[in-house]
Image (cartoon, rainbow, N blue to C red):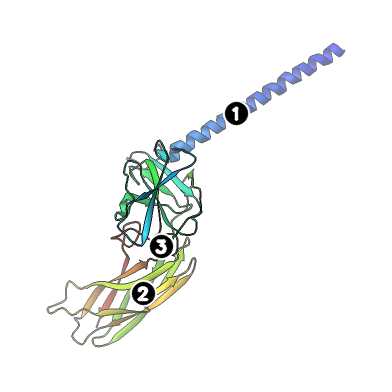
Amino acid sequence: MSSLAGGYRRHWLKVVLLMLLIAESLSLFVLVLENYRQEWSYGSFQYGCSSLQASPAASNDSFVRWVRLTCPNGPSVRMSPSGSCGVRENPCTHIFPIFTPPTGLLGLYAVDHANPTCPDNSPYAGYLMVNGVGEIYGSFGFPATDLDYCAVTTASGGTMDEFSVRWSLGYGVLSPWFRSSFPSNVTVTQGGTATFTMTLTSYNPYSGNLSFATGQVSNEYAGSPITPPTLSFSPRSVILKADGSNSTLVTIHAAPNTNLGSWRAQLFMTPVYGLWYYGGFTPAPYASANGTSSYQTSTIVYVT
């Protein structure tokens, strides 16, 4: 009887071991499958070293200083594009950085390891990194895949605290942005005035100082001489806080000799940058790090 019981125990032991082996193999298969799925969807990356070396970079701006960060024997991080990047596009790496900017850091840019300069006067030479915001490297995004970093601080900033940067595959979150809302058309009489309110709302969350200006006011059917209506703003700039809103009053004035008909008026909202917060500096000659100097919208003005 004991022999029979021993046989059952050995049998059950074999069954348990077999089940454990199957479970372990299944877990390993799922892990490999998940890694393959992530690489197929997002690409992959590899750090070049655990501690970066800093060296001063040339700058033509007396208000800021640039520091180049790289590994002793190669790039700081290497992207391997293999993720989906459109139907007929070459592969990309979809990834986002995770870091907390220390006090005094105005911007941290991902730059091409093969290009020894920092984006002092060329915003397209670097990719401004924002914590948690998705980036694309490869044919459809920033063209370089062997990357270093360029940090920009105020010229009198002194010593900056150490900080770490790590990367995570995926799409991340959308970058901070804002939306403007106002009437799509406004009517004003010759020799008169009309007003409307333009409201700005922060998303994701956007914060900053925005100034307003009028662009081209055009009417292709206006006779000669052309006298367009004029637009003014009160106030000329507003502070937009994260997840908040603010507004300005737009006044339209039509002179007695302003041509009748419909006019398309361009409205510009331009970030006013300062040297006191992360993202507060952007390389000249553009007013924003993505190469767009202003955000443009328009409204139709009917002169009757």
Q: Secondary structure at mark 2?
A: loop
When asked about the image quadrant of residue 236, the answer is bottom left
* Residue at 39 percent of width and 60 percent of height: 155
Q: Secondary structure at mark 3?
A: loop
* Residue at 32 percent of width and 67 percent of height: 297
Q: Secondary structure at mark 1?
A: helix
Category of crowding for the residue at label 1, using alpha-carbon neighbours closer than 10 angstroms: few (below 14), some (14–19), many (at least 20): few
On the image, the x and y values in percent for residue 296 come to 31, 66
Name the residue tied to disc 1.
26
Category of crowding for the residue at label 3, using alpha-carbon neighbours closer than 10 angstroms: few (below 14), some (14–19), many (at least 20): some
Mark 1 or mark 2, earlier in chain: 1
* Callout 2 amino acid: Pro
* Callout 3 amino acid: Gly
Label 3, label 1: how far apart the Cα atoms are: 50 Å
* Residue at 34 percent of width and 67 percent of height: 270
Rendered position, 51 above or below 278:
above
Name the residue nearer the viewer: 172 or 129: 129
On the image, the x and y values in percent for residue 101 come to 48, 55
Name the residue tied to disc 3.
280
Name the residue tied to disc 2.
183
Rendered position, 122 above or below 19:
below
Which label sits in the foreground, 3 or 2? Answer: 3
Mark 3 or mark 2, earlier in chain: 2
